[in-house]
Image (cartoon, grey):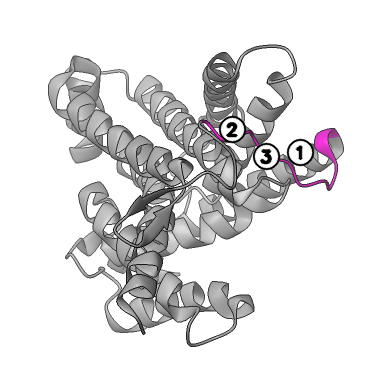
Amino acid sequence: MSPDLFFQYLFAGITYGSIYAVVAIGFNIIYNATGIINFAQGEFVMLGGMISISLLHFMPLPLAIASAVALTMLIGAAIEILFIRWLQSPSVMRMIIITIGISILLKEVALHIWGESIRSLPYFYGNEITTFSIGSVHISPQVVWVILASAVMVAGLNLFFKSTPIGREMRACSANRTAALLCGINARNMVTLSFMLSAGIGALAGCVMSPITYTQYDSGSALALKGFTVAILGGLGNSGAAVLAGILLGIIEAFSVSVVPLAFQDAISIAILLVILFVKPHGLFGSGDAARLKDF
């Protein structure tokens, strides 16, 4: 493999890995606050892209994206209030079934509203043939948008959880919900906020990636699988490790194209997930919580 092709694959892997990492962080936010593995996370990404594409007919691109993120956050809050809040100490398996059902419901609603057509937002800068060069490697400006947006979301979430009162309250609920309740923290509101936050970052990721990956009513399912793989790979609940794990999976997928057909790319994620669950269910970076998946 030539050096030029190597770096081209590397940048492609980092781009897609950044997207997977953001989806995985969405899994981790809800898991840390509730212990729930939300398999509807990919649908938040899809909704962000689809809603922003629809709103673009009525408003400028930045406002369409901001409105799509806000609407998706409201959908996330509604899902928690309607389907999650009323449950009393549900089993892990029950919650998995419920979130899979929510995923199917959102997908069917999206199919009814937008149909089967594939859509995309316009490039934030230039178009599909606009590139800039780093040495002999040609990179689309939208790739830079994806990587920067992912980095800003990760840094912003880290700052939110460590430096804001609400963020610290969410961390307290994650560490010990009973103690948080005794300290006067409204745990139910923190759970609702976790769904809103998870939906918001998923929607923003869906908007930023739409110009290069396109958006369809069922595009969230594959992202949910890969985001879950990254969450397990990094250690369920460990958002910092999810960034490294996402980039690792993205790079593996990018370089695998030179070995196996593109049609088998999703199978690589499934194979990695199965190997991790059987060999090291707590993830590569040591979060023991993931080992609970063996109880399924």
Q: Quadrant of residue 170?
A: top left
82 relative to 184 in the view: left or right: right
For mark 3, what is the residue?
120
Q: Quadrant of the N terminus?
A: bottom left
Q: Amino acid at mark 1?
A: Ala
- Which is more N-terminal, label 1 or label 3? 1
Mark 1 highlights which residue?
110
Q: Quadrant of residue 171?
A: top left
Q: Along the polypeptide, which appears first: circle 1 or circle 2? A: 2
> SS for tag 1?
helix
Nearer the observer: mark 1 or 2; the answer is 2
Residue 292 in view (yes/no)? no
Q: Which residue is mark 2?
A: 48
Q: Position of residue 288 (x, y in %)?
A: 21, 63
* Residue 130 as seen in the image, left or right of residue 150: right
Q: CA distance from mark 1 to mark 2?
A: 11 Å
Residue 250 screen position, x and y as percent: 39, 64
Q: Is residue 24 visible?
A: yes
Q: Tell me, yes or no, whether the two marked residues, 2 and 3, touch with CB atoms within 8 Å.
A: no
Say which residue appears at 35% left-offset and 24% top-offset. 190
Local crowd at mark 3 within 10 Å, few (<14), some, or many (≥20)? some
Q: Residues within 10 Å of mark 1 (few under 14, many from 20)?
A: many
- SS at badge 2: helix
Is residue 89 or residue 146 the one in the foreground?
146
Of the numbered discs 2 and 3, the one sitting upstream in the chain is: 2
Quarter occupied by the C terminus: bottom left
- Tag 2: amino acid: Gly
Q: Nearer the viewer, mark 3 or mark 1?
A: 3
Q: Residue furthest bottom?
A: 259
Asked whether the beta carbons under mark 1 and mark 2 sit within 8 Å of each other, the answer is no
Question: Circle 3 sits in a helix, a strand or a loop, which is it?
Answer: loop
